[in-house]
Image (spheres, rainbow, N blue to C red):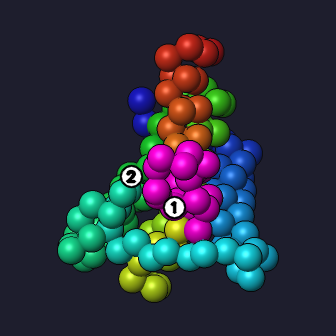
């Protein structure tokens, strides 16, 4: 069901999205001296790294859809929170990809048998998706 949400929901969604984008950028600046950066022109696990234009367009459309749903579809508080966090992470990665042509990954996997790096935006996307999934399936208003 589509409906324009109350002003406080718009402010809340905007604040969460803004915080998520700023958290990723601030962390890279604050911890730049002690980090090992890797650059990913593709999506997760570097898939489609030979098609950065496709990834840019796809991530831009995905961000727009996520933000639209977050602001205009009626849902419970926790689902909205999850979508806002996911939107912030997706927007952070999109903006970085738009301005620099790649996403900077800098957090190493905590598991020694997995040699991947990720960033806070990736964590936000995963956490937001998990929160929204749980809210939509287990917590109904």
Q: Are marks 1 and 2 in contact (CB under 8 Å)?
A: no
Residue at image x 60%, y 75%? Answer: 36
Any magenta on residue 134? no
| Residue 2 coordinates in the image, percent (x, y) | 43, 36
Is label 1 or label 2 in front? 1
Residue at image x 42%, y 30%? Answer: 1
Q: Is residue 45 above or below residue 111?
A: below
Q: Secondary structure at mark 1?
A: strand
Viewer-proximal residue among 108 and 19: 108
Q: Which residue is mark 1?
A: 117
Outermost right residue: 30
Counting residues from the start of the chain, the first of labels 1 and 2 encountered is 2
Please say whether residue 34 is visible from this viewpoint: yes
Q: Is residue 7 above or below residue 120?
A: above
Viewer-proximal residue among 125 and 118: 118
Left or right placement of residue 40 versus residue 137 in this view: left
- Residue 125, label in figure: none
Left or right placement of residue 103 versus residue 30 in this view: left
| Residue 112 coordinates in the image, percent (x, y) | 54, 49
Q: Which residue is mark 2?
A: 65
Task: Give the extent of the magenta segment.
Answer: 106-124
Residue at image x 65%, y 66%? Answer: 24
């Amino acid at each position: 069901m589509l409906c324009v949400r109350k002003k406080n929901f718009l402010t809340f969604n905007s604040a969460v999205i803004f915080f998520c984008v700023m958290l990723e950028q601030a962390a890279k600046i604050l911890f730049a001296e002690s980090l090992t950066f890797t650059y990913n022109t593709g999506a997760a696990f570097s898939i489609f790294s030979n098609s950065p234009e496709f990834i840019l367009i796809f991530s831009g459309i995905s961000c727009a859809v996520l933000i639209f749903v977050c602001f205009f579809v009626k849902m419970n508080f926790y689902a909205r929170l999850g979508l806002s966090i996911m939107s912030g992470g997706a927007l952070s990665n999109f903006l970085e990809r738009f301005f620099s042509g790649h996403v900077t990954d800098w957090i190493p996997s905590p598991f020694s048998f997995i040699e991947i790096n990720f960033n806070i935006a990736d964590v936000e996307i995963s956490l937001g998706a998990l929160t929204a999934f749980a809210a939509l399936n287990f917590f109904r208003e």
